Image (cartoon, rainbow, N blue to C red):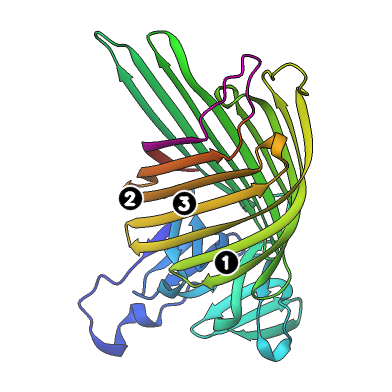
Amino acid sequence: MYLLGRHCKCTGADSSWDKFVPPPDAKFDWIQLTSGEWLKGELKVLYNFKVEFDSDELALQTFDLEDVKRIRTHKPQSLRIEDPELGKKPIFVEGIVSMSDDKIVVTVGDETREFHRDHLVAIAHVDKKKRDLWSGEISLGANFRGGNTETIDLNMKANLKRRTASSRLVVDYFGNYSEEGSVETSNNHRLSGYRDVVVSKKFYWRQLGAEYFRDRFKNINNQLTLSAGLGYHIIYTSKSKWDVSAGVGGRYTKFVSVEPGQSIDNTTPALGGGTMYDTEFTSWMDFLLEYDFQIVDEEAGRYTHHFITTLSNDLIGDIDLDFSFDWNRIQKPQADFEGNVPDKDDYQLIVSFSYDI
């Protein structure tokens, strides 16, 4: 990616850089920032009011949409447009994109369609098999202590997203391992994901939500939950997003051990919901809160809750410093074969480094 800027001492509207427009380009995309600089590379995606622009030289760069003045692509893209005059539901168009100031022109062959910039919601590659639709983040935290007491604490978080103009696929992993004096004190893993499809400007259909959970210290050997439902955008701006969702499904649980006469596994209907809030405190600090719950039968715990909140601070490049608080609760844990009942609540404070991939 190349950066062209204004370096002369010219002032006023006569500056040559103010009038500069890159020549036609069949190999690269171009964007112009509100400061006047032009960038050459590849438009990865426009989503959640963020523009991701990539190159082999400067890697992935992310800009607020409000800081981007112009976009010009060299090949067709898929756009999601929400214009009240065109109907309540979003429309999806494909073509070569040229955005200048408040106008977006989409070209397919000799035909063009024009939209207002304010009605643009997303841009993604037309080829949905390309790896360019994917982005992610991985976070690692560790604590090692020696001497009279040897302690090891390890945790890992990972997030993977695949976004198109009409849908999103999100996969999350969260795991912990602790050891004290060569004795394992915690070992749990949670892998979850969902696929959402746009229904209207505010509503989305969660076609499938899935979660795998394992925590032998909670007497859960394997647990799988599948569901489907609906979601709603309460807030959707360039700085803040707040979603709520609800759905129905089922849960299968296999316990590590149970009291005599009890079944080692359980299958139950599940009614659940959740919320996600993400806001940008400053240009270098973000806050994320996620909470979900499930209502199941008594043998499976009756009510289960998972809450995690993260304060993420930009450090260097794609590396962030994260402070997270994680809480898990099972209202009625299943007793093991000796009659021991696990604690209802588990919680931890985590300091980790994360990297955007």
Residue appearing at x 25%, y 8% in the figure: 148
Q: Nearer the viewer, mark 2 or mark 3?
A: 2
Q: Position of residue 12 (x, y in %)?
A: 26, 88
The reply, left or right, for residue 221 in relation to residue 62 is: right
Residue at image coords 29%, 72%:
6
Task: Residue 313: give its label.
Answer: 2
Question: Which of the two marks, 1 or 2, is nearer to us in this view?
Answer: 2
Residue at the farthest left position = 9
Does the segment drawn in magenta span residue 204? no
Q: Amino acid at mark 1?
A: Asp
Helix, strand or loop: magenta stretch: loop
Which residue in the structure is indicated by mark 1?
25
**CA–CA distance in space, label 2 to label 3:** 18 Å
Q: Which residue in the structure is indicated by mark 3?
A: 60
Q: Residue at x 49, y 75 (%)?
A: 70
Determine the secondary structure under disc 1.
loop
* Left or right of 170 on screen, residue 52: left
Bin the neighbour count of mark 1 within 10 Å (Cα to Cα): few under 14, some 14-19, many 20 and up.
Answer: few
Q: Which residues make up the magenta segment?
A: 334-351
Q: Is residue 76 visible?
A: no
Q: Quadrant of the N terminus?
A: bottom left
Of helix, strand and loop, which one carries label 2? Answer: strand
